[in-house]
Image (tube, rainbow, N blue to C red):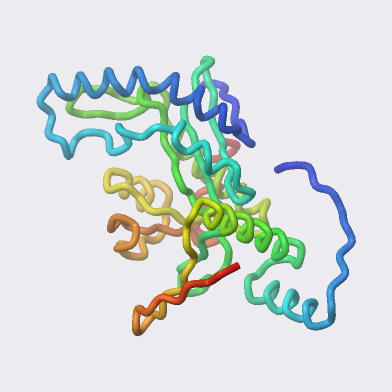
Amino acid sequence: MAQKRTMTLNLTKAEMEVLGDLAQRKDLSKTAVLRQALRLYQAVDERLADGGKLFFEDKESKKAEVVVL
Amino acid sequence: MVNATLLDGLRPSDLDLIERGWSPYRLRTLERLLRSGAPREDWPESLHWDWSKKRADLRLLEASGFGIVCNEDWQGVLMTKTASHAARLPDDTGKPIVYVDYVEVAPWNWRIESLGQKSRFMAVGAVLMRTAIRQSLEEGFRARVGLHSLPQAEVFYRNTCGMTPLGRDDEKQNLLYFEFSSEQAKSFLDQGGAS
């Protein structure tokens, strides 16, 4: 695994709560949640930059909703 | 038993090197298959792969490349992703996994019965699958690993690795999706000793 560097992060109470909730639900450390978020953001951003589109599909109606980042 | 080196952090240029080493053998294999008249369903399903076309994926933070080198040749390659797929097993649904995007052994390690070709090196695929499990442990994903299997490899993932098949995926060429639970992965890891 690549060498890591440490940084301090300032988050609001609401952001901390979401981070804590995601860490619990995803069975991850808070650092790992943020790392996952960064990876996902980059992957989506690269696809959008290449002209791709991101959308969510409703399970029942199969209706697609385009998401803009 | 031979000594081999497992490399991580493969770069796009490594994929070019790998393909340069493998493509002549792929071509020779194709020629031999054509001459033999072997039915298409017996042809190795990754015969048409080209690792150099996957180089763009390695720009992504979520993508990792691993390779095994022995006798100065690449013997197998693994590419994983860590953010764009989630676990599907009932107890783990939605949790992060290491997703095996591509894994392939060198063409001279393919076992092709219609050509009487045996693997030059055995267990390369198993070592790469254990590498994916170790990556999952290092990421804090508790050894969870998932993949879509090509039909010819289903027996390997089911019987050799002990993964759970979770149905065919119509959004992924109807390939069968397999997943390691933490327990299954650790059991497979234990079987391999240091490999």
Q: Quadrant of the C terminus of chain A?
A: bottom right
- Residue drawn at x 87%, y 56% as measured from the top left: A7
Q: Is residue B113 left or right of residue A63?
A: left
A21 vs B54: above or below: below
Regarding residue B56, the answer to whether it shows in the image is yes
- Residue furthest to the top in view is B71
- Residue drawn at x 40%, y 75% as measured from the top left: A64
- Residue drawn at x 89%, y 61% as measured from the top left: A8
- Could you tell me residue A3's position as x and y percent? 78, 42
Q: Is residue A2 left or right of residue B75?
A: right
Q: Quadrant of the N terminus of chain A?
A: top right
- Residue drawn at x 74%, y 66% as measured from the top left: A29
- Could you tell me residue B192's position as x and y percent? 53, 41
Q: Is residue A30 left or right of residue B194?
A: right
Q: Nearer the viewer, residue A35 or B69?
A: A35
A20 vs B161: above or below: below
